[in-house]
């Protein structure tokens, strides 16, 4: 019997009715709700690549939960007006969408045939040893009295562990998903002090609805930063109203805020682990809550802070050394890890000859028809950073952000090989393929903030 209420979602050309119970038991948490009444075909394949369990469950759902959805192909009803700063409408036709989807299926199959999606355990063993060495070397420098140098190496270790955690959470490293989750718990909770489940929930939503207003948490930085006009509606409390006075200057103080992001992430992780997860309506968060709090979570996060404070607690001037190996590595680690994410996820309108580069910073409105075209969503909302041997290593492959969003389970070391194919795909399908150097991307990000600053003045 079909559920009377629940979530309607389209996968592989079939509409499915998912009950509320199924949605709340979804292993990925609430990310599935991002595609209510939308085509989730390619986001399903992107997230569940290599998971026999997920495809078996989909086969069962297609037999038991298929429905006739009495709707028409969605059309974009949102029209941009001059006050919609940094917002764009989606103007790819249904016919163009179908062509893009068919061509993308061919590209995805080609990557499978040529081994681009195969795990590369040898690469990740080397990366793990390399990153552990950086952290242990920072501890050695602490004991040797090179506190500022130690802080720099510890910041670099935090950054590199961030990339590893990211890749284990995306199941790039091993075929066994449970092992991937266990390693991500170690590299995330123990080595960095972040809650794995908190981060996965945030990041999955970001992949599912990149730069879609009210659906992508990564662009919700209010009340300190306003990215789109809708953010201004959130300033209701007295303190928020006071902070609104600073928005006209946000493009000036934005860079100064970046070092604080790591502190923000850590505090949000603690709140999630100890207060949110155990009461969540989503079973997976409740299931993992006790483990994160008691065995892997609480002790892992305590181990994280204790391991970084124990060496300095043996020094007489402990407060001086705490600054050197506690606060200082936290600040640069934030700056090392987050600029690429903030810069690379800049949406773009379809590029016409008369449009200027500042148009590449637009977002898309809530429930945009863009959600029905995962391929366009990943490309229109993302730019790459020009690659080099150092850039590939330093930014953990996230300089190939377009390729990563299209194929999130593809191992980092294969992204550079995929680049030329994806670039050719974009050209064939009349889609932009943005790639810029770091400075150009940073200026574009500041321009976006200045657009909103001028609106508030």
Image: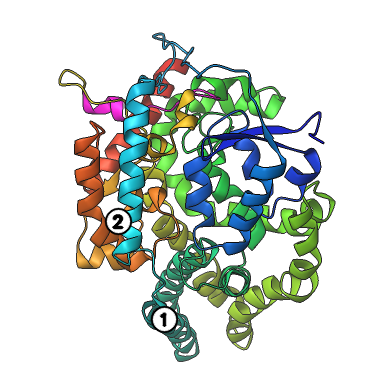
Q: Position of residue 422 (x, y in %)?
A: 26, 48
Q: Position of residue 139 (x, y in %)?
A: 49, 85
Quadrant location of the N terminus? top right
**Label 1 crowd bin: few (<14), some (14–19), many (20+), radius 10 Å:** many
Q: How many marks?
A: 2
The front one of 351 and 442 is 351
Magenta: main secondary structure equals loop
Q: Is residue 159 visible?
A: yes
Foreground: disc 1 or disc 2: 2
Residue at the image position 47 percent from the left and 80 percent from the top: 135
Residue at the image position 47 percent from the left and 54 percent from the top: 259
Residue behind mark 1: 134
The front one of 446 and 65 is 65
Start and end of the magenta stretch? Answer: 356-368
Q: Examine the rendered structure and indicate whether residue 232 appears above or below residue 406.
A: above
Q: Is residue 224 visible?
A: no
Under circle 2, the secondary element is helix
Q: Position of residue 31 (x, y in %)?
A: 62, 44
Residue behind mark 2: 110
Under circle 1, the secondary element is helix
């Amino acid at each position: 019997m079909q559920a009377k209420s629940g979530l309607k979602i389209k996968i592989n050309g079939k509409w499915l009715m998912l009950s509320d119970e199924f949605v709340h038991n979804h292993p990925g948490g609430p990310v599935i709700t991002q595609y209510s009444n939308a085509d989730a075909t390619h986001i399903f394949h992107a997230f569940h690549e290599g998971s026999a369990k997920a495809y078996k469950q989909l086969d069962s759902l297609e037999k038991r939960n298929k429905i006739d959805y009495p709707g028409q192909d969605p059309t974009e009803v949102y029209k941009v007006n001059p006050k919609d700063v940094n917002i764009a409408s989606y103007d790819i036709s249904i016919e163009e969408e179908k062509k893009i989807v068919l061509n993308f299926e061919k590209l995805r199959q080609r990557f499978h045939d040529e081994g681009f999606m195969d795990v590369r355990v040898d690469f990740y063993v080397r990366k793990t040893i390399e990153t552990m060495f950086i952290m242990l070397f920072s501890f050695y420098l602490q004991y040797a009295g090179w506190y500022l140098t130690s802080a720099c190496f510890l910041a670099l270790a935090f950054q590199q562990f961030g990339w590893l955690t990211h890749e284990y959470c995306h199941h790039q490293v091993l075929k066994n998903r449970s092992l991937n989750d266990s390693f991500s718990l170690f590299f995330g909770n123990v080595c960095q002090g972040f809650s794995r489940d908190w981060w996965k929930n945030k990041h999955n939503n970001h992949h599912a609805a990149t730069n879609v207003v009210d659906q992508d948490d990564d662009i919700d930085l209010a009340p300190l930063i306003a990215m789109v006009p809708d953010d201004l509606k959130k300033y209701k409390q007295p303190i928020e109203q006071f902070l609104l006075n600073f928005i006209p200057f946000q493009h000036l103080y934005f860079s100064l805020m970046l070092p604080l992001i790591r502190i923000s992430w850590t505090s949000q992780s603690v709140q999630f682990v100890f207060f949110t997860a155990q009461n969540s309506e989503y079973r997976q968060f409740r299931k993992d809550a006790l483990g994160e709090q008691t065995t892997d979570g609480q002790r892992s996060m305590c181990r994280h802070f204790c391991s970084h404070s124990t060496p300095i607690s043996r020094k007489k001037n402990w407060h001086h050394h705490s600054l050197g190996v506690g606060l200082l590595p936290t600040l640069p680690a934030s700056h090392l890890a987050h600029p690429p994410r903030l810069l690379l996820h800049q949406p773009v309108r379809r590029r016409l000859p008369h449009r200027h580069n500042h148009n590449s910073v637009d977002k898309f409105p809530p429930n945009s028809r863009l959600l029905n075209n995962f391929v366009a969503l990943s490309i229109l909302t993302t730019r790459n950073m020009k690659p080099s041997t150092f850039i590939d290593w330093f930014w953990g492959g996230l300089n190939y952000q377009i390729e990563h969003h299209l194929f999130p389970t593809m191992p980092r070391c294969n992204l550079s090989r995929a680049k030329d194919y994806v670039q050719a795909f974009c050209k064939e399908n009349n889609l932009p393929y943005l790639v810029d150097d770091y400075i150009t991307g940073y200026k574009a990000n500041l321009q976006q903030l200045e657009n909103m600053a001028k609106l508030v003045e």
